[in-house]
Amino acid sequence: PPAPPQKPKVGVAVFILKGEKVLLGRRLSSVGHNTFALPGGHLEFGESFEECAAREVKEETGLEIEKTEYLTVTNNVFSERAKPLHLVCIFIRGVLADTNQQPQNLEPEKCDGWDWYDWNDLPKPLFHPLEVLVQSGFNPFAAT
Ligand code: 8DG
Ligand code: MG
Ligand code: MG
């Protein structure tokens, strides 16, 4: 039988702001393998963007976040892949509920580990959708 038509998916990626730093981890998943990305994942049926952000951050890092806010959205078509992918990514920001809490690498098959990086000295290479956003001049600290 023919393959079912592909559909866009909704991703939610989270800037956790701590001083001048954001939390990033090197991806081990096939999409964006070895690139630095924000914690995040796919929107589940019935979820708000903010709920998805808090859930994915908790699942992937153990961190509790608060003051979650919508920042922006990007449209990402990965057409050069064997299995093309179309992701609409919602970017959210939040802060730690407890500033002393440390991230844990709770999905070690998907991420090499989490660390805080200075916004003015981000690691390379960034995950492509994040790289495009940063190159556009977007600043999660300044956005309102
Ligand atoms: P799930 O099964 O837990 O729901 O998903 P996941 O395995 O955690 O998904 P993910 O790939 O981490 O995130 C979902 C999509 O969000 C990802 O394939 C593409 C999009 N996305 C971006 N930028 C970023 C980013 O900086 N970090 C993350 N995690 N996802 C991002 O466009
Ligand atoms: Mg996830
Ligand atoms: Mg994820």
Image: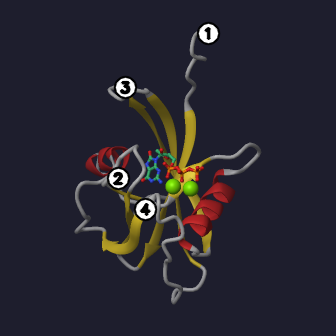
Instruction: Decide if residue 115 is on the left or right side of residue 68.
Output: left
Circles 1 and 2: CB distance less than 8 Å?
Answer: no
Residue at left offset 42%, top offset 50%: 29
Three-letter residue code for mark 1: Pro
Q: Amino acid at mark 3?
A: Ser
Indicate left or right for 12 with 77 as reference: right
Q: CA distance from mark 1 to mark 3?
A: 23 Å
In front: label 3 or label 4: 4
Q: Amino acid at mark 4?
A: Cys
Residue under circle 1? 1
Residue neighbourhood size for the residue with mark 4, other residues' Cα within 10 Å, grouped as few (<14), some (14–19), many (≥20)? many
Q: Is residue 132 visible?
A: yes
Question: Looking at the picture, does residue 64 appear above or below residue 69?
Answer: below
Measured in 3D between alpha carbons, the distance from the residue under mark 3 to the one under mark 4, in whole angstroms, is 24 Å
* Residue 70 seen in render: no
The image position of residue 14, as x and y in percent, is 50, 59
Q: Is residue 50 left or right of residue 12?
A: right
Mark 2 or 3, nearer chain start: 3
Distance, label 4 to label 2, CA atoms, is 24 Å
Ligand 2, by image quadrant, is: bottom right
Q: Which residue is mark 2?
A: 138
Residue holding disc 4 = 111
